């Protein structure tokens, strides 16, 4: 890869982590360039109202919040560009990054990865339509559960996330239906005990979703027992999908230390990766919290770590001169 441009601080990704890193990096005079990726604004552009980000007492829509993040980053002269990073070479010391399959190649002194993760969806037409319409389909109970207080909801999945979100929802909702495709949970025993203890969670083992019902808002869900082939309609107003997330880290495989599911490992308590000058923030490294506010927090950490790293290499260059 032959670089056509050199960048002091490159940020990849435009969710809360990337923009927060940009705000801090720009204010530290690191002249950040931020590539937005395929989904400018990240996962929050798929959410309706955000009520749990401090500083917005009346709530704000996810897409609107991301416009404000971008404006704040640009106010300090972050160079925000559209473009999709397709390849990296972290052999170093300058890090090479290819954009849009070779349309552009840059080298960077510091790289902050904020590529996030994507929720997995079932892929049903009704599910995606109602999700996009903000009609009661969500992949985040902590973000959206509050809107269904006192109502009946369903959640799909049998792993730790589904179990954790089901118990969260059970505290708010009248009843929670868990739709699990196998005859057993994948979740840990400890999480299973929590489900058993909650009186208002009904687990439907061996069930799969056929269709989410409703034109503009969820009015029910049709499920099928995959053993008996019997169908039934669950009378719900909120439909949650918790079948896993995929971190958007494929292009970094082979360069950065990752866990078995592709989450980038950071040096504990920092945003540093195993490669000097490459930092990570947000959901690309976080399979536990996955909140806008935690992503923003780690974006700040990444920019501060990058600033210290760049100052140290600058000192080295000056000492050699
Ligand atoms: P998992 O991959 O562990 O579980 C996904 C669940 O969704 C499984 O029950 C799976 O079913 C089901 N599923 C997948 N695809 C479909 C589909 N198309 N239709 C219906 N069901 C489907 O993902 P999680 O997000 O739950 O967890 C990810 C990782 O994070 C795990 O390692 C987990 O332990 C960890 N985690 C830990 C927590 C904690 O410790 N507090 C909290 C949350 C997550 P099947 O079993 O049949 O494949």
Image (cartoon, grey):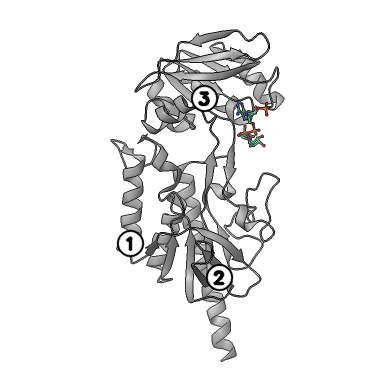
Q: Which mark is residue 168?
A: 3
What is the number of the mark on residue 171?
A: none
Q: How many marks?
A: 3
The residue pinned by badge 2 equals 309
Indicate the quadrant where residue 287 lies: top right
User: Residue, x 45% and y 17% (percent of image)?
Assistant: 173
Residue 313's x, y, as percent?
56, 77
Whole-angstrom CA distance, mark 3 to mark 2, is 40 Å
Is 321 located above or below residue 206 in the figure? below
* The one of 245 and 109 positioned closer to us in this rendering: 245
Quadrant in the picture for residue 82: bottom left
As helix, strand or loop, the secondary structure at mark 3 comes to: helix
Sooner in the amino-acid sequence: mark 3 or mark 1: 1
What residue sits right under mark 1 in the picture?
74
| Residue drawn at (65%, 53%) of the image | 265
Q: Quadrant of the C terminus?
A: bottom right
Residue at 30% over, 62% down: 75
Badge 2 or badge 1: first in the primary sequence: 1
């Amino acid at each position: 890869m032959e670089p056509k441009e050199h960048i002091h601080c490159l940020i990849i990704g435009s969710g809360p982590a990337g923009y927060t890193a940009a705000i801090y990096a720009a204010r530290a005079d690191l002249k950040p360039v931020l590539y937005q990726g395929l989904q400018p604004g990240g996962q929050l552009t798929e959410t309706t109202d955000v009520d749990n980000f401090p500083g917005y007492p009346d709530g704000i829509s996810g897409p609107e919040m991301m416009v404000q993040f971008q404006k704040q980053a640009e106010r300090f002269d972050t160079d925000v560009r559209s473009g999709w990073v397709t390849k990296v070479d972290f052999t170093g010391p300058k890090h090479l990054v290819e954009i849009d399959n070779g349309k552009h190649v840059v080298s960077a002194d510091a790289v902050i990865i904020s590529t996030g993760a994507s929720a997995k969806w079932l892929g049903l037409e009704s599910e995606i339509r109602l999700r996009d319409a903000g009609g009661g389909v969500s992949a985040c109970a902590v973000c959206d559960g509050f809107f269904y207080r006192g109502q009946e909801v369903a959640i799909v999945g049998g792993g730790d996330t589904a179990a954790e979100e089901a118990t969260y929802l059970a505290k708010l909702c009248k009843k929670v239906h868990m739709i699990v495709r196998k005859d057993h949970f994948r979740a840990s025993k400890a999480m299973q005990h929590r489900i058993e203890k909650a009186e208002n969670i009904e687990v439907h083992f061996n069930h799969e979703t056929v269709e989410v019902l409703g034109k503009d808002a969820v009015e029910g869900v049709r499920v099928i027992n995959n053993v008996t082939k019997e169908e039934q309609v669950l009378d719900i107003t909120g439909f949650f999908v918790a079948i896993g997330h995929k971190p958007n880290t494929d292009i970094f495989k082979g360069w950065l230390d990752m866990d078995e599911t592709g989450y980038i490992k950071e040096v504990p308590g920092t945003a540093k990766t195993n490669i000097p000058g490459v930092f990570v923030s947000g959901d690309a490294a976080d399979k536990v919290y996955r909140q806008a506010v935690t992503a923003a927090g780690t974006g700040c950490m990444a920019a501060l770590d990058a600033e210290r790293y760049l100052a140290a290499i600058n000192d080295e260059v000056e000492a050699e001169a």
